[in-house]
Every structure is written in C-alpha cells, then in structure tokens.
C-alpha cells in the first residue's frame, strides 16, 4: 500500500501480533468482527525472538494454552526453549487463521474528527472504528545512566545472545530479575567469573508442596486471589521485577545465597560509575532478605489455605533455608577485577509516544481500567498489571482479552 493511497477501512485494528494480539484475534473471530493485526516485525513470534540463544520459559508447558489452541505436548511439566515458544506462537497464528499483516509498523495513532481512528503505518493509512493496542509493555531497553570506561563492552540482555560472543574476561551482570539471574548462572556455568549486582527482586520456589509454582499462581488467579493493580500501594510497582526462578535443566530454584557460595560474587544495587570505578548501594543483605521472604509474604498463606479448604493430599513444605551471608561491597575497580563486559539486565521502559491521544499518565503508561480507556473504541491488552499480576504473562492474557470481548 503506497502512502498516497486511500486509507484502508477496517472495523477493528489490533496493533501487534504477539501472543496478546493473537489471543485477541481469536476472540474477535468468535464474535464475527472484521479485523486485521498489524505486526511491525517481518516474522511472527513476538518478543520471544529477542531472547538469548539458551533462553527457556520459566512457566511450564502446561500453562501455554491459548483459546482454541491448548497445549497437548508430551512434556506438560517441561519448559520451552526460545525457538519452541516462537514456533508455537507461529503455529497458533496459522491454526486460527489470524489476519496478520507483517512488516507494518504503526507510526502514529490518532482520532478522527468524524469518529474512530486513523493509523499512519509504514505501509500507508488505516482507518478503524476500534483499535486494540496489543503491543505489550516492554519496548525500550532500560540502561542506568553512568560513565563507564570506553574499553568495556556494555550490552543489554535484549542484544545478548550467548557467552561465546563476549570478549574474554569477567562479567558484571546488573539486575536480578528473571533474566539477570538466569544469565548469571549461564555465564558462571560457562566458566566466566561473574559479579552480580542484586536488586530488590523476589524469588519463588520452582515447586511448592508438590506442584509447580505457576500452577499455584494460576489457581490463585482463577480464585480471584491475586492482588489487583488498584491495590498496589504505589503505581511504580507495576514495573517491579518479576520474581526469579529458572526453567533450565528441567526447572530449579534460583537462590542467590547458593549462587554466592558457588562462586558468583554478589554486590548491592548498582548506583553509578566513573570510568573503572563502580559504586553499589549498601543494600545487599536487605535485598537478599527480601528475596528470601517474597514467596512467604506474598503467596504461601493463600496457597496453604487452598490446600486446606480443598482437602488436597499435598506433601509438607520441604524447603530448607540456605544460610550464607556474603559480604557487602560498596565499590569495585572493574579493571582490577578483570571485568570486560557489563551485561545490563535492568528491564525495559514503555514507549507509547506514537499514540497521539491524551491517555498517558505521568509514567507514560496508558490510563485504563481492565484495558478500557476513556477514549471510546480504544482498548489495550497485554500491559503489565493491566488488571493484576498475571496480565502480561503467557497464561494470563486470555482472561483480559475475554473481558474486552464480552464488552462488545
């Protein structure tokens, strides 16, 4: 479509053809709604295509079921690799005959004076009565401001692919969300000396009382026991790191104290750098305590109540605390430590600057209630904490999509 062509008229445009957009397409088809999905990438597979070579999901295969596409594989308790989840996403698009138009980037979304919306894309203009923005909430890699020595390779996990591509030497990994912890473990297993900057992130056990942690979280969600976004004490918590756990090696716990005992050097939260000198906050002990308590503070009592009320024959809690207290480190000389690479696993920030409508809050996030905005016809799907903690997860997006579909 040339840019000088007449706008294409579509009842509903879905921006993004990742898991959220495809799930929305399934509901739109069931409702008999004409629609098209605009995908900026040349290939389907969503953001999973940006993960590193050895990436594995932390959610078990059993929960990778989408509407009209249940998981029926041979390993419900296994954890898909990057290429497997990309392939599954593509097969889902084919199974539901999703009307996807690839290589179509939406550059501007605005309202029309006569009603509806106009989308300026890399392949011309679209006009629609309704728009569903299913572009997620992880858009631009976030890297803290610092002045590091030019000799250092700085790379965000978004660009990292494998250990062999890094220059020889030790690696400073900044961040202990799911990616940071798994990458630190991967680099250490490859023989690298690893320094891990520990943030304020929780951890969860891989299994609790005989069941994978995400099956318990799904159970909590189905019973309406997960906290909602309007119950968060601070809206900035929508961007808090996800608790860490691993799907590698059949799935296992990720205890940072055990990491330290095994040879990964732990330091506190990254505060800044000047050349070779890097400063860390004196919060390592506090961050480790937070990680240790996270599951017990947030989930354990509710899971135990489900077990008791349902009369489940569940084994006892067999977790054993690992008592190791690494020393606090306030600064390091990276050259003296032999560090050649700083690997930022510091997450992403949202970028909805292409939406030319007054709907963004002070953090740049769309104002919405369960995906519905104050602009008639404009909805969102797949935002972190759109409704509750599972909204942006592989197993949670369908609930939010169903809610939107039931409004039509």
Image: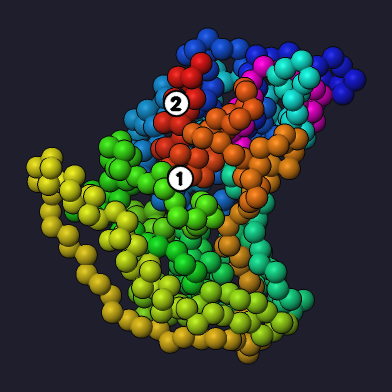
SS class, disc 2? helix
Give the image quarter of residue 14: top right
Which residue was labeled with disc 1? 229
Q: Is residue 74 visible?
A: no
Residue at 82%, 20% in the rendered image: 1
Query: Badge 2 local density, few (<14 within 10 Å), some, or many (20+)?
Result: few
Residue 335: horizontal and vertical position, in percent?
Answer: 66, 86
Q: Nearer the viewer, residue 58 or 321?
A: 321
Residue 201 to residue 231: above or below: below
| SS majority, magenta | strand
Left or right side of 191 for 39: right
Which residue was labeled with disc 2? 403
Query: Badge 1 local density, few (<14 within 10 Å), some, or many (20+)?
Result: many
Residue 269 to residue 306: above or below: below
- Mark 2 vs 1, N-terminal side: 1
The Cα atoms of the two marked residues, 2 and 1, are separated by 16 Å
Residue at 25%, 72% in the rendered image: 321
Q: Is residue 135 visible?
A: yes
Residue 369: horizontal and vertical position, in percent?
Answer: 51, 35
Q: Is residue 131 magenta?
A: yes
Residue 20 to residue 175: above or below: above
Q: Nearer the viewer, residue 296 or 346?
A: 296
Q: Nearer the viewer, residue 3 or 116?
A: 116
SS class, disc 1? helix
Residue at 72%, 77% in the rendered image: 148
Magenta stretch bounds: 119-135
Left or right side of 81 for 323: left
Residue 221: horizontal and vertical position, in percent?
Answer: 33, 40
Left or right side of 68 for 213: left
**Tag 2–tag 1 contact (CB < 8 Å):** no
- Which of the two discs, 2 and 1, sits closer to the camera? 1
């Amino acid at each position: 479509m040339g840019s000088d062509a007449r706008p294409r008229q579509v009842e509903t445009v879905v921006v993004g053809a990742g898991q959220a957009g495809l799930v929305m397409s399934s509901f739109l088809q069931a409702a008999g709604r004409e629609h098209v999905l605009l995908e900026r990438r040349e290939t389907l597979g969503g953001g999973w295509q940006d993960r590193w070579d050895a990436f594995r999901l932390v959610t078990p295969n059993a929960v990778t079921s989408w509407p009209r596409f249940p998981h029926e594989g041979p390993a419900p308790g296994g954890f898909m690799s990057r290429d497997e989840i990309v392939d599954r996403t593509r097969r889902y698009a084919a199974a539901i005959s999703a009307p996807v138009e690839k290589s179509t980037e939406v550059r501007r979304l605005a309202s029309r004076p006569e009603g509806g919306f106009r989308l300026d894309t890399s392949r011309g203009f679209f006009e629609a009565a309704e728009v569903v923005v299913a572009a997620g909430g992880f858009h631009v890699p976030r890297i803290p401001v610092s002045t590091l020595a030019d000799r250092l390779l700085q790379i965000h996990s978004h660009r990292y692919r494998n250990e062999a591509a890094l220059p020889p030497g030790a690696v400073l990994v900044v961040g202990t969300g799911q990616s940071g912890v798994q990458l630190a473990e991967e680099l250490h297993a490859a023989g690298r000396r690893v320094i891990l900057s520990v943030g304020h992130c929780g951890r969860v056990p891989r299994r609790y009382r005989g069941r994978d942690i995400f099956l318990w979280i799904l159970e909590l969600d189905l019973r309406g026991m997960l906290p909602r976004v309007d119950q968060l004490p601070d809206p900035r918590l929508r961007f808090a790191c996800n608790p860490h756990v691993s799907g590698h090696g059949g799935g296992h716990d990720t205890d940072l104290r055990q990491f330290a005992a095994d040879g990964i050097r732990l330091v506190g939260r990254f505060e800044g750098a000047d050349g070779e000198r890097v400063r860390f906050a004196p919060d390592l002990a506090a961050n480790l305590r937070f990680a240790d308590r996270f599951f017990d503070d947030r989930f354990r009592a509710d899971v135990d109540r489900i077990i008791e009320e349902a009369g489940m024959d569940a084994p006892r809690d067999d977790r054993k605390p690992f008592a190791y207290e690494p020393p606090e480190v306030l600064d390091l000389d990276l050259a003296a430590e032999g560090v050649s690479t700083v690997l930022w696993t510091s997450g992403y920030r949202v970028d909805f600057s292409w939406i030319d409508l007054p709907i963004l809050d002070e953090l740049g996030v769309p104002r919405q209630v369960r995906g519905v905005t104050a602009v008639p016809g404009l909805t969102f799907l797949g935002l972190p904490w759109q409704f509750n903690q599972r909204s942006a997860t592989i197993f949670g997006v369908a609930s939010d999509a169903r809610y939107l579909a039931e409004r039509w």
